[in-house]
Amino acid sequence: MTASLLLPALSYIFGWGYFISWSLSFYPQPLLNYYRRSTSGATIDFPAINILGFAAYFISNAAFLYSPEIRRQYAARNHGLTPTVKLNDVAFAAHATICSAIAMSQYFPQIWGFEDRGRRRERVGRTVMGIFIGSIIGVGAVAAVVASYPGDDVVTGWAGIDVVYAISYVKLVVTLVKYIPQLVTNYNNKSTHGWSIHQILLDLIGGFLSLGQLGIDSYIQRDWSGVTGNPVKLSLGNSSLIFDSMFIIQHYILYPGAGKNEHSESSRLLDAEGEAA
């Protein structure tokens, strides 16, 4: 098989491979919460900020993939090339938004019948609320500038693509901060109990595959602007590698006993359900 056929095939495999891995990573935590009948040990900030981030990621990816005008403006700024956004990027973002909303709903015990008696209802942190508000203001400001100062030259002037980039940067900000509350919670508890390591392992695999697809697509175009022109996908993959490594260190090195407790508790719950059936 020649390189002209091999590289697109690898890009396809890596792209849908990361879609599967990252998509599966959204299931271990809600399932663990369901089996434990509790969300203790996992912060509400993570799913809350994920809803914002992945909704923004979906909108920006859909614009780059399906909007002829945005694609024309991208080509004008990137040597006539097309965006490196693929169908698997849009599909992943849509699926992630839905899964994050489901995970968020588990922090309302009455919906799922969880018994979190005596536990104060967790609220979204001020930092996350600040990011929500700041994102709305930031995107709105860019949209206002584009509407007020439309440029004839999309390369040097303001254009609709700048609004799309502003929306995508919301995901960039979310990606850089969303793991921190959970890392701090694990540190304060000196435990990863209640936080699924399986989602982290799947997320790590997805990060490698996502970066691999981005690199292959840019190599096919013989222009690395495909990487710089898709900063969110680049940061998403890199942040996964960095933060997932931190969670793995916490789980297996710093607080190794939590993993055994989590496994045994989940097993007991599964066994109990099996006996009841």
Image: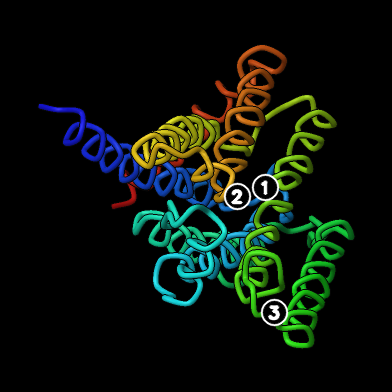
- Helix or strand or loop: what does disc 3 sit on? loop
Quarter of the view holding residue 90: bottom left
Position in image of residue 240 (x %, y %) = 59, 35
Q: Is residue 127 left or right of residue 38?
A: right
The residue wearing badge 3 is 151
The residue wearing badge 2 is 232
**Which amino acid lies under the numbered mark 1 shown in the image of this protein?**
Thr
Q: Which mark is residue 32?
A: none
- Closest to the observer: 79 or 270? 79
- Helix or strand or loop: what does disc 1 sit on? helix
**Which amino acid lies under the numbered mark 2 shown in the image of this protein?**
Val
- Answer with mark 1 or mark 3, whichever residue precedes in sequence: 3
Position in image of residue 147 (x %, y %) = 73, 87
- Answer with mark 1 or mark 2, whichever residue precedes in sequence: 1
Number of numbered discs overlaid on the protein picture: 3
The residue wearing badge 1 is 175
Residue projecting furthest to the left: 1
Q: Which residue is depicted at the point 74% across and 55% down?
A: 45
Q: Could you give the CA–CA distance between mark 2 and mark 3, rounded to whole angstroms?
A: 25 Å
